[in-house]
Image (cartoon, grey):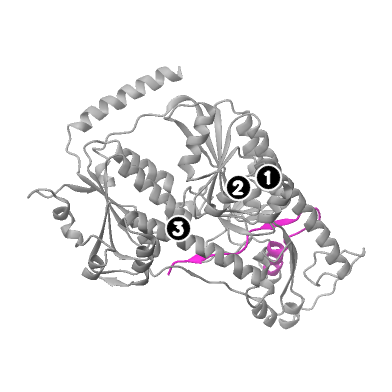
């Protein structure tokens, strides 16, 4: 029956495409990117936020749009307008991959913008031509990394971090406990930035057909304004937006240009997905926690780990994994990981559930912008791990502890008395730091979890324990470096992982891609008083509770200004 319905629908679609072919189609389709584009979108937020929240454009959606353009022989190419393009390097590389794929189909890719910073210029160099608005500029100045340390600021308000790291390379605790970088943190930040900067230069060199040295000289010569950018070879021409049609024309007649929304009326519709087994994509994103996945109650302009960020809960992910393992219509599974880690026990629960999936059907892991610490842990069941060169991964290590807020209560004149029974009743209490005996016990817990982490990576990656330890200890790597260390198998994005999973399952191209999107609950602190808010923050930062160590990615961030 499914094949009969498929045949009828395909016939109707083919008939509709015949009518579309006789209608005029634009020569160039104009697409606009106004911000960073995530690989996959998070689940829709619960009511009422979904009424006011616009569904974001994702690389998956953009890829489908470009595929449709690439499969229509009447379209010559696209004009991609870039405004405020941003995002992690891995996202920029995935966007570049889509542009290269469109060019391989024979389409011309033109990028136009008012201004090009480092992120926009890296994307633009994947095009056939780079155009600049009159009075615009190329200001790809390079990369700048900023690190913040709150120890003194927290001390001013009576708060101190009491956390223990497996090694100094596990730097997430530095934010709360230090006033400057440790030697190990500086060393790690340097090798990450060096590799990322090299990747940017390689992208520019490839796109502009120049050497790495020339690409570096081009960056160091910024900014370029107007015709200066053409003379320097940074762009191909300075063209006003109103003159784009005339510029792209090969004759006296301007080309026809239209937005994608308008062009959809005449573009040929793609072939329908084939009936039968599909490839399922399971998304694990945000902080890994015990419990159910959740979305933050509201957005903040900066990421606050474990507080106002998306959460991936083991109850949700394990349930999804078990369902995928039993679903006979799912021929292969791709796990998309975009997480800096979290709870060790939840990471183990997710990894164990995914291992049961891998035992019965092909399972491939696609790493997003970050798949580190617990994010790497859940990736270990994959028979193949795919990452972009700019993905942040690794951070195989453990840290644990708590934030002590006793001084804060004194400063704001909150008086409290605590009664305890049991020698270590206050082990995870924010009211007092660890005793030496408790610190020794905590270290034992951390080393136990770390050995378990090493064992899982060693078993799944076919490496010795010492080999994993040599690249572990909290060390963070780019995807390119992880490939060299044997932590990933291949460089690429989600599309590459889907293709590998499809091939492993023996499925033909054109099969349905099923994105698993569970409904996620809102998370919010209980109570509305100042005390409730303080306790909620303490719970978020209490990284280890009895029987549950936490794995967190180092807080390394790169900003393109």
Magenta stretch: residue 355 in it?
no
Image quarter of residue 538:
bottom right
- Camera-nearest residue between 540 and 393: 393
Q: Is residue 540 left or right of residue 94?
A: right
* Location of residue 393 in the rendering, given as x and y in whole percent from the top left corner: 58, 54
Crowding at dot 2, Cα within 10 Å, few <14 / some 14-19 / many 20+, comes out as some
* Location of residue 452 in the rendering, given as x and y in whole percent from the top left corner: 76, 49
Q: Are marks 2 and 1 in contact (CB under 8 Å)?
A: yes
Crowding at dot 3, Cα within 10 Å, few <14 / some 14-19 / many 20+, comes out as some
Residue labelled with disc 1: 463
Structural distance between the alpha carbons of marks 1 and 3? 27 Å
Q: Is residue 403 left or right of residue 65?
A: right
Image quarter of residue 119:
bottom left
Q: Are marks 3 and 2 in contact (CB under 8 Å)?
A: no
* Location of residue 395 in the rendering, given as x and y in whole percent from the top left corner: 64, 57
Q: Can residue 34 be seen from the camera position used here?
A: no
Magenta stretch: residue 540 in it?
yes
The numbered mark, 1 or 3, whose residue comes first in the sequence reads 3
* Location of residue 187 in the rendering, given as x and y in whole percent from the top left corner: 60, 68
Image quarter of residue 136:
bottom left
Q: Which residue is painted at 17% across and 52% down in the image? A: 248
For the residue labelled by badge 3, is the local secondary structure a helix, a strand or a loop? helix
Crowding at dot 1, Cα within 10 Å, few <14 / some 14-19 / many 20+, comes out as some
Residue labelled with disc 2: 486
The numbered mark, 2 or 1, whose residue comes first in the sequence reads 1
Q: Residue furthest left?
A: 252
Structural distance between the alpha carbons of marks 3 and 2? 19 Å
Q: Which residue is painted at 30% across and 36% down in the image? A: 71
Residue stretch rendered in magenta on the structure: 532-561
Residue labelled with disc 3: 199
């Amino acid at each position: 029956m499914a094949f009969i319905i498929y045949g009828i629908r395909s016939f109707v679609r083919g008939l509709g495409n015949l009518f579309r072919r006789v209608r005029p189609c634009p020569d160039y389709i104009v697409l606009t990117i106004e911000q960073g584009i995530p690989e996959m979108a998070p689940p829709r937020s619960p009511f009422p936020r979904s009424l006011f929240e616009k569904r974001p454009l994702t690389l998956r959606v953009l890829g489908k749009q470009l595929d449709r353009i690439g499969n229509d022989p009447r379209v010559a190419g696209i004009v991609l307008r870039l405004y405020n393009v941003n995002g992690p390097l891995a996202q920029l590389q995935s966007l570049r991959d889509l542009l290269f794929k469109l060019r391989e189909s024979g389409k011309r890719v033109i990028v136009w913008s008012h201004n090009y910073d480092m992120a926009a210029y890296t994307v633009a160099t994947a095009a056939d031509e780079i155009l600049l608005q009159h009075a615009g500029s190329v200001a790809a100045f390079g990369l700048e990394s900023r690190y913040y340390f709150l120890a003194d600021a927290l001390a001013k308000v009576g708060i101190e971090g009491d956390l223990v790291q497996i090694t100094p390379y596990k730097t997430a605790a530095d934010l709360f406990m230090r006033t400057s970088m440790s030697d190990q943190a500086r060393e790690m930040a340097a090798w990450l930035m060096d590799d990322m900067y090299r990747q940017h230069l390689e992208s520019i060199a490839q796109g502009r057909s120049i050497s790495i040295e020339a690409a570096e000289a081009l960056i160091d010569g910024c900014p370029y304004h107007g015709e200066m950018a053409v003379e320097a070879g940074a762009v191909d021409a300075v063209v006003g937006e109103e003159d784009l049609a005339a510029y792209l024309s090969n004759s006296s007649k301007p080309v026809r240009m239209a937005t994608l929304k308008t062009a959809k009326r005449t573009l040929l519709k793609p072939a329908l997905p084939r009936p039968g087994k599909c490839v399922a994509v399971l998304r694990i994103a945000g902080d890994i926690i015990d419990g159910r996945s959740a979305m933050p109650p509201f957005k903040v302009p900066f990421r606050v780990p474990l507080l106002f960020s998306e959460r991936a809960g083991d109850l949700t992910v394990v349930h999804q994994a078990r369902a995928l393992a039993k679903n006979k219509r799912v021929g292969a599974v791709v796990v998309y990981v975009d997480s800096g880690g979290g709870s060790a026990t939840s990471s183990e629960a997710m990894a164990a559930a995914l291992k049961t999936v891998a035992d019965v059907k092909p399972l491939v892991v696609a790493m997003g912008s970050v798949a580190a610490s617990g994010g790497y842990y859940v990736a270990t069941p994959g028979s193949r791990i795919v990452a972009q060169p700019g993905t942040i991964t690794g951070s195989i290590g453990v840290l644990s502890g708590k934030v002590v807020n006793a001084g804060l209560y004194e400063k704001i004149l909150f008086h409290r008395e605590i009664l305890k029974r049991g020698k270590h009743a206050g082990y995870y209490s924010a009211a007092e730091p660890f005793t030496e005996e408790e610190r020794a016990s905590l270290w034992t817990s951390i080393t136990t979890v770390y050995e378990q982490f090493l064992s899982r990576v060693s078993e799944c990656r076919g490496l010795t324990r010492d080999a994993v330890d040599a690249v572990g200890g909290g060390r963070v790597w780019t995807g390119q470096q992880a490939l060299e260390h044997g932590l990933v198998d291949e460089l690429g994005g989600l599309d590459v992982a889907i293709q590998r999973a499809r091939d492993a399952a023996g499925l033909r191209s054109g099969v349905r891609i099923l994105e698993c999107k569970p409904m996620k609950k809102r998370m919010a602190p209980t109570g509305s008083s100042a005390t409730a808010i303080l306790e909620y923050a303490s719970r978020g930062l209490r990284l280890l509770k009895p029987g549950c160590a936490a794995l967190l990615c180092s807080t390394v961030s790169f900003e393109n200004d």
